[in-house]
Image (cartoon, rainbow, N blue to C red):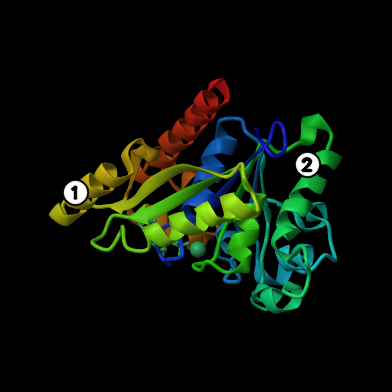
Amino acid sequence: MALNPGVRILVLANQKGGVGKTTTAINLGTALAAIGERVLIVDLDPQGNASTGLGINRKDRSLSTYDVLVGEQPLSAVIRETAVPRLCVAPSTLDLLGVELEISPHKDRAYKLRHAVQTLVSSAPDSERFTYVLVDCPPSLNLLTINALVAADSVVVPLQCEFFALEGLSQLLSTVDQVKRTLNPELTIHGIVLTMFDPRNNLATQVVADVRKFMGDKVYDTIIPRNVRVSEAPSHGKPVLLYDLKCQGSQAYLRLASEVIQRERSLRAA
Ligand code: ADP
Ligand code: MG
């Protein structure tokens, strides 16, 4: 059962930095919007790379997810439109670094985002309701990530195709399991997305085989290739799908979006 009917809340999580969480949040979000979904990206990383990559300047972030988590603003007040139709973002700022200290005395400290999302969804008329919320997490299993996992229906785990890809995965999976047992019984793993694949690198091919062996059909069929256009796009404040729709990276994120929707359908049918 979805936490909020009609809305799927997916969290991009991996406590390793540089594995493609933010890139996947931006470009999966854009691809879902391109095929007609109404998408909100919630930036929960103090670095704010998702906000920057979606063209929201730092000086235009007077309200951010910090204000939401400390309870001073509803999500609706911080949401910004982006250049992509049907794609909005709740931006973050470095203030988020202090949030853990500020909310840790609160009894509902792990539920802050969940409550904010529920309020947003229940107050919006059907025609304006987001159909996907993607939460971009910091590279840590801290209270920010816990808030994301507690607010989520499902977790999407980006794994970089490199030698140590699987290292740390068991810790992430056990955190997900712990949140499922204690705070959010409906939480599931949506899938594992292999990122930055370079076919010229034999090791990368071996990593793909290993991850598929250990994680089976949890791994999406789509693999995101290493593609320079993907890494250039954020400096233009654009998702790669706007920067260069035809490049391999954009095409891979479009395929990933259809796969995500396909999995949603089979989950609902199950
Ligand atoms: P995370 O959010 O997990 O820290 P990022 O999404 O910020 O990771 O990606 C880390 C770096 O790798 C960024 O500089 C990003 O532009 C680059 N990158 C991510 N995906 C790709 C890709 N498919 N091809 C090339 N560069 C990529
Ligand atoms: Mg990031």
* Most foreground residue, 55 or 207: 207
Amino acid found under the numbered disc labelled 2: Val
Q: Assess whether mark 2 and mark 1 are in contact (beta carbons under 8 angstroms).
A: no
Q: Is residue 42 toward the left or the right of residue 222 in the image?
A: right
First in sequence: mark 1 or mark 2? Answer: 2
The amino acid at mark 1 is: Thr
Above or below, comparing residue 68 to residue 258 in the picture: below
Where residue 248 sits: x, y (%)?
34, 43
Residue found at x 61% / y 71%: 46
Could you tell whether 183 is left or right of 107 in the image? left
Q: Nearer the viewer, residue 143 or 256?
A: 143
Label 1 belongs to which residue? 205
Where residue 75 appears, x then y in whole percent? 78, 54
Asked whether the viewer can see residue 82, the reply is: no
Q: Name the residue at the left extreme.
A: 202
Rendered image quadrant of residue 45: bottom right
Distance Cα–Cα, label 1 vs label 2:
42 Å
Disc 2, ligand 2: is the CB inside 8 Å?
Answer: no
User: Viewed as shown, does residue 223 lie left or right of 243?
Assistant: left
SS at circle 1:
helix
Give the quadrant of residue 93.
Answer: bottom right
Q: Does the rendering let one see residue 33?
A: yes
Whole-percent x, y for residue 61 in the image = 72, 67
Report helix, strand or loop for mark 2: helix
Q: Mark 2 = which residue? A: 121
Query: Of 168 and 206, which appears nearest the observer?
Result: 168
Badge 1, how many Cα within 10 Å: few under 14, some, many 20+? some
Q: Position of residue 107 (x, y in %)?
A: 78, 66
How many marks the image carries: the answer is 2
